[in-house]
Structures are given as C-alpha cells and as structure tokens.
Image (cartoon, helix red, strand yellow):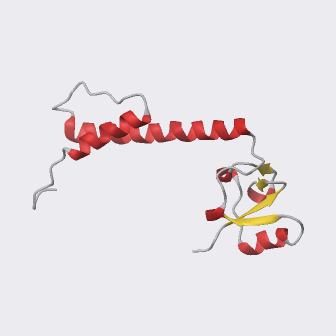
Amino acid sequence: MTDEWLIVKRELYFRPDCQGYTGIRDDAGRYTYGVAKSYADHGCSMVKLSDAPEFSKACYPDLAAAHMQKQREAALGYATRLATCLWETHWKAASPDWKPLPDLMGVLTQIENMVAHLKPMQKGHS
C-alpha cells in the first residue's frame, strides 16, 4: 500500500488536484510522496495522511464545527440503520413497538442490549 500525503500551504491543506485550500483533512487532496515533495521543494510543506490533524491550524472554527456535526449525523444514521436491522432480524416479534432513540449514545446502547441477548447459532443452522 502506498503512503498518501497532504500538501500544506499557509497552514491549510491543498484540495484534490491542487484546486484551492481547506482546513479539513477529509476534504484535502491525497498525493503521492513524489508530488508532495515537489511542492515541499517550492515553499509548501507535506504531511503523511496518517499524521495529519483532522483540522489544520488555520481551519475556521465554524467550518470545523459544521464538519463535526455532519460526522455526528452520519454516525447516528449508520447506528440507527444497524439497530433497525438487528431489531427486524431478531427482536421484532418480541418487541413490536420498539423505536430507535434519537441520539447516538442511546442507539448504541440499544445495539449493545440487542447484541448482548443474542444466542449463538447451533451447528447445522444458518
């Protein structure tokens, strides 16, 4: 697997294809070592993707907050879909009125409770 690099200028990450700047690592372009090094040789810096902070030093706080909110909403959506799948597959008959809770920790607790009470499958059953 090849390492991915970010290019940094004025404490902001280059966007993909060097088309502008962003303070958010998830929105930054990924570059090969050779490309990043060529920019570093001309006044930019480079950082390995795995070492880059989620938000650069120059990231606007409101943009960082909006990005984190989007991530929380995505996590809640994913957890809710997982909990609903578990309920439909294993618990619908026993708890027909179940509904997912409205917050991430609530849904994760529901998933934990559903999974903790699952019985191992017997040999020969699929």
Q: Nearer the viewer, residue 50 or 93?
A: 50
Residue at 89%, 69% in the rendered image? 42
How many callouts does the rendering have?
Answer: 0
Position in image of residue 29 (x %, y %): 71, 58
Q: Quadrant of the N terminus?
A: bottom right
Residue 115 lies left or right of residue 28; in this view the side is: left
Residue at 58%, 36% in the rendered image? 69
Q: Quadrant of the C terminus?
A: bottom left
Residue at 67%, 53% in the rendered image? 25
Residue 82 lies left or right of residue 27; in this view the side is: left
Position in image of residue 15 (x %, y %): 75, 54
**Hey, which residue is sitting farthest front in the picture?**
57
Snapshot quadrant of residue 11 = bottom right
Snapshot quadrant of residue 64 = top right
Q: From the viewer's perspective, is residue 69 above or below residue 26? A: above
**Hey, which residue is sitting farthest top in the picture?**
97
Q: Nearer the viewer, residue 37 or 105?
A: 105
Residue 13 lies left or right of residue 121; in this view the side is: right
Residue at 79%, 51% in the rendered image? 21
Q: From the viewer's perspective, is residue 50 above or below residue 64? A: below
Q: From the viewer's perspective, is residue 25 above or below residue 3? A: above
Position in image of residue 66 (x %, y %): 65, 36
Q: Nearer the viewer, residue 82 or 60?
A: 60
Snapshot quadrant of residue 89 = top left
Position in image of residue 53 (x %, y %): 66, 55
